[in-house]
Amino acid sequence: MLVDPDRSYRRNRVIALGRLSLYGPGASRLHEEILAVAAIWSEGEPIEAFKTAEAEEKAIESFSTVLARPELLEVKDDMVKKVIAGAAKDEEALWETLKKKAMTRIFWAEDRLRQRARVEADEMARILEAQRTAIDKELAVRTERDKAAAAAALQPSLPFAPGWLPEEKEQKDQYDADTRHMITRRSRLDAEIASEPQRIRDLYEVKHHRLERVGLVYLWPATA
């Protein structure tokens, strides 16, 4: 229970808080946020969530302002006992509204996750296709170079003459190793271009969600 320093608001308010979490494959957490639903609180009267976003936002703003204060004002014990006695009933009264709000946020979050998945999948496809193009180009160059070397009756791969120096032999070995690596990498790229973007999209697919009760906050207006 908190004292609201906003003297422009004279009515007691209650805020129900819930934590919404969305999970993907392997229980990976894709999204999490705290949701809030606010209402006027009056002793002995049923509570009903605010109908307008403006009223709810003002209550949440007041809550944030109170939390930012270096010291909290005291609340009388008898008032604390009153709200505690009815807290479970108040929370239940706001819970259905909080669940409806959660469903709206789930649709929003899933749409954002799909957008993010699409961007990352497209970027992965672009990277892999660029690798394939670069390797194809380099292998074509090396193939022509080897053909030219063979036609000149020289050693393939690099036009080194017999009696190579040690450093020349090392260069040729490295050149041949690089060529073998590119051929191996090229053989895998077609499959990766087909599978990796989809794998990324699958990572952002929401498998289940959870809405947990966090608690209630009562805002009492500060007296003049």
Image (cartoon, rainbow, N blue to C red):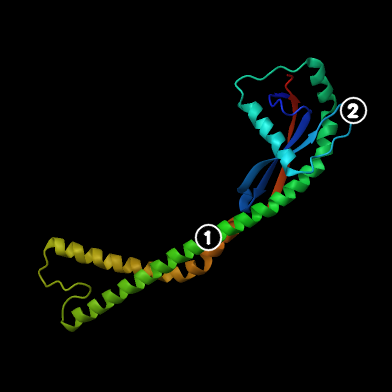
| Image quadrant where one finds the C terminus | top right
In the rendered structure, find residue 44 and report the number of the disc placed on it: 2
Q: Quadrant of residue 98?
A: top right
Q: Which residue is mark 1?
A: 119
Mark 1 surroundings within 10 Å by alpha-carbon count, few (fewer than 14), some (14 through 19), many (20 or more): some
Quadrant location of the N terminus in the rendered image = top right
In the rendered image, the vertical position of residue 61 relative to residue 188, given as above or below:
above
Residue type at numbered disc 1: Val
Horizontal arrangement in the rendering, residue 163 relative to residue 52 (left or right): left
Q: Is residue 190 above or below residue 203?
A: below
Spot occupied by residue 191 in the image (x, y as percentages of width and height): 49, 69
Which percent across, then down, holds residue 220? 75, 25
Q: Residue at x 82, y 30 (%)?
A: 41
- Mark yes or no: residue 115 visible: yes
Name the residue: 84% across, 22% down.
82
Which residue is situated farthest in the left direction here? 163
In front of the other: 62 or 191: 62
- Residue 206, visible in the rendered structure: no
- Residue depicted at x 20% and y 81%: 148
In the image, residue 100 sits, relative to residue 133, either above or below, namely above
Secondary structure beneath label 2: loop
Q: Tell me the residue at 64%/44% (across/down).
A: 32
Mark 1, secondary structure of its residue: helix
Q: CA distance from mark 2 to mark 1?
A: 53 Å
In the rendering, at what x and y percent does residue 24 appear?
63, 52
